[in-house]
Image (cartoon, grey):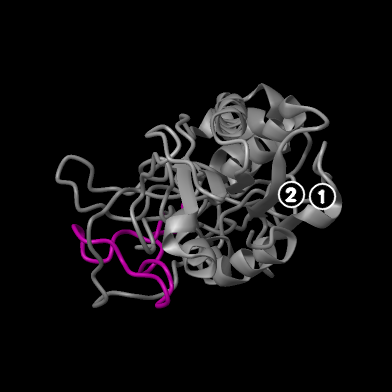
Amino acid sequence: MLPFVLSTILAFGAEAAPVPEANPQFSGIPGFGGGSSTSNPFGGFGGGNIPTSFPTPSGLPGGLGGLGGSGGGSALPTGLPTGGPGGFGGGSSSSSNPFGGLFGGGGAASSPTSGGSGGFSIPTSGGTGSSTSDDLKNGACKPISLIFARGTSEPGNMGSVVGPPFASSLKSTYGESNVAVQGVDYPASVDGAVSGSLDPGSQEGAKTMTQLAQQAASSCPSTKIVLSGYSQGAQQVHGALQDLGAGNNVAAAVTFGDPLSKTAFQNIDASKTKVFCADGDSVCNGQFVITSAHLSYGSDADSAAQFVKSVVPSS
């Protein structure tokens, strides 16, 4: 349990930091840790920032790729040598917060003297659309109602990696005037990522998503409800479906980078659910270390919208 909790805390430290613009001049792959516990207890700074397919943050030139993991030498009580925390990363445009988030993820070392992967914090990827949407709260009643939960530390209530591009794809698929988009307001904090894996139904985001789904069903009985979430937000989808119980009005559930990808959704037919897990995304495999694959789900927005269309036809 201890390695699971520690790795979860490290991995979910910062999935995004709000930055208003991109700086394509600086790009590259975050460096890795390394170094021995005797001569270099830290693996050093990670070089560059996130890969070229993602805009880089403004503020610091490209941001910091993240400190390398600790050199090792000490082990967890289980005997597993650890790479230690990944360090700070992802420069923000904010003068008061030049760092994009908390920890980038350490990863276990392969031996007591190797540092493990430094990882990186996740700056905003400059997704399509606004990071906040409150259509249901503002009384919208449309044929499709998307309720989306963002990942850890993402901006607004829709985030930036997946939420806005998925909402945009749904509107393109069904028509702009036929889709209401509602983000889930919840802390999306590091400790929530830990508890969300252990008991998703008790999470604040899950309870808020449940209330929003019930509100949509009550005030707009003909709407088709789509629950969706990214990373920690995916945990809220699992939890909301638990809380809603059987006979709910959810027409489809779609998750991205789902820490509970190996856990079946409750109270919904499996044919109405879809989990997007990219190759190399350690979060989906229970390792809880953020990699570039975990940032790639914006590219699945169109496929996700087409899946929803296949199970929720236009009226």
Mark 2 → mark 1, Cα distance in angstroms: 9 Å
Give the quadrant of residue 61: bottom left
Determine whether the residue tagged by mark 1 lies in a helix, strand or loop.
loop
Residue type, label 2: Gly
Residue at horizontal 46 percent and vertical 42 percent from the top: 182
Residue 226 in sight:
yes
Q: Which of 7 and 177 is in front in this view?
A: 177
List x then y, in percent, for residue 190.
51, 34
Residue at horizontal 59 percent and vertical 35 percent from the top: 193
Write down the residue under mark 2: 286
Residue at horizontal 83 percent and vertical 30 percent from the top: 246
Q: Which of 234 and 110 is in front in this view?
A: 234
Q: In which quarter of the image is the C terminus?
A: bottom right
Q: Main secondary structure of the magenta part?
A: loop
Residue 260 relative to residue 117: left or right = right
Q: Quadrant of the N terminus?
A: top right
What are the residue bounds of the magenta stretch?
Answer: 42-66
Write down the residue under mark 1: 262
Query: Would you say the residues marked 2 and 1 are in contact, meaning their CB atoms lie under 8 Å apart?
Result: yes
Residue 209 relative to residue 269: left or right = left
Q: Is residue 151 magenta?
A: no
List x then y, in percent, for residue 297.
56, 64
Residue type, label 1: Lys
Q: Is residue 54 magenta?
A: yes
Residue 269 relative to residue 86: left or right = right
List x then y, in percent, for residue 2.
72, 31
Total marks placed: 2
Disc assigned to residue 278: none
Residue at horizontal 63 percent and vertical 44 percent from the top: 225
List x then y, in percent, for residue 30.
44, 67
Q: Nearer the viewer, residue 10 or 173?
A: 173
